Structure formats: C-alpha cells, structure tokens
Amino acid sequence: MARIFTSFAMEDKSLRDLLVGQRHNTRNAIEFTDYSVKVPWETKWKTNCRERIRLCSGVIGIITGSTSQAEGQLWELRCAIDEQKPVLLIHGYSNLLLRASAPPPFMRGHRIFDWTEANIVRFIDSL
C-alpha cells in the first residue's frame, strides 16, 4: 500500500479528512496510508515534515483558494519537489467559484486535476 503525504491548508482540514475517508469506502479502489501532518508541530516542524515526505511514495496536494496564503502547505509542496516526489494536485472544490485558478507559481507545469476516484487511483497506481 502506498504511503501518501497529503498537503492541505489548515483551513481546509475537513477536505483532508474527506480524502482520507475515501479509503474506507468499500465502493471505491482508493488505498493508501496517510502520512499527512494533522496538527502543526511546535518545534522542528520542517525537519519532521521533510522526514515524513521522504518516507512517502508521493504527495497529494489539495488546492483551494486558501492555498496561496497557506505558508505551511506551500513549504510542504516545495519540499516534495525538492525531494523529487511525485505530486498530484487536486481541486478541493468542484464549485468553480471556490477553486484556485492556478497552482502555486513554483509549481508551473503542474496541472490541478479534478478530485475524482479515477484521478487519485491512477496517481497511486503510478507510484
């Protein structure tokens, strides 16, 4: 089973919970071990976070309008790139008004995919 680090803005914690919850739905084929940071670390958070990312097969970034201001999430995504981890960016919302229009500038060339079972399973199977 793939180890996945889920990157999200703290304001979007409920979206991370939904993604992780999809693993428990027997009607779909999403299987992974969640290595995301559920609460911010007080000290050495970047060191601890980098270690978790290193242990993972890939990173799923939940992208919303909050992402551009989420310093922790932006650092996590940069770290994933630095560690040469495969990254899947997914829209946190299907509503076009709530979607981020583009990935963070340092992720140019990465597309934000719709949050679908097929997109997530394809990513996990590619790891």
Image (cartoon, helix red, strand yellow):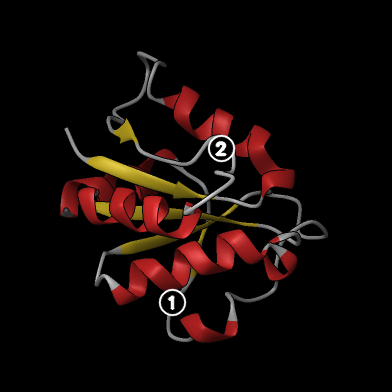
Is 66 placed left or right of 92 in the picture? right
Q: Residue at left 35%, top 66%? A: 80
Q: Earlier in the sequence, mark 2 or mark 1?
A: 2
Mark 1 crowd level (few <14, some 14–19, many ≥20, 10 Å Cα): some
Q: Look at mark 1 in the image and give the residue it sits on.
A: 110
Picture quadrant of residue 99: bottom right
Query: What percent of the width, then of the height, locates residue 16?
Result: 56, 37
Q: Looking at numbered disc 2 in the image, what kind of residue is underneath it?
A: Arg
The reply to whether the C-beta atoms of the residues labelled 2 and 1 are less than 8 Å apart is no
- The one of 105 and 48 positioned closer to us in this rendering: 48
Mark 2 to mark 1: distance in Å?
Answer: 20 Å
Task: Locate the N terminus and report the quarter of the image it occupies.
Answer: top left
Query: How busy is the neighbourhood of tag 2: few (under 14 within 10 Å), some, or many (20 plus)?
Result: many
Q: Residue 87 carries which label?
A: none
Q: Residue at x 32, y 48 (%)?
A: 52
Side (left or right) of 118 relative to 78: left
Report the disc number at residue 16: 2
In percent of the image, x 48 and y 23: which residue is there?
21
Left or right: residue 88 versus residue 126 is right
- Which one is nearer the viewer's eye here, 25 or 61? 61
Residue type, mark 1 in image:
His
Q: Looking at the picture, how far across and down is residue 51, in whole percent? A: 29, 53
The answer to whether residue 16 is above or below residue 109 is above
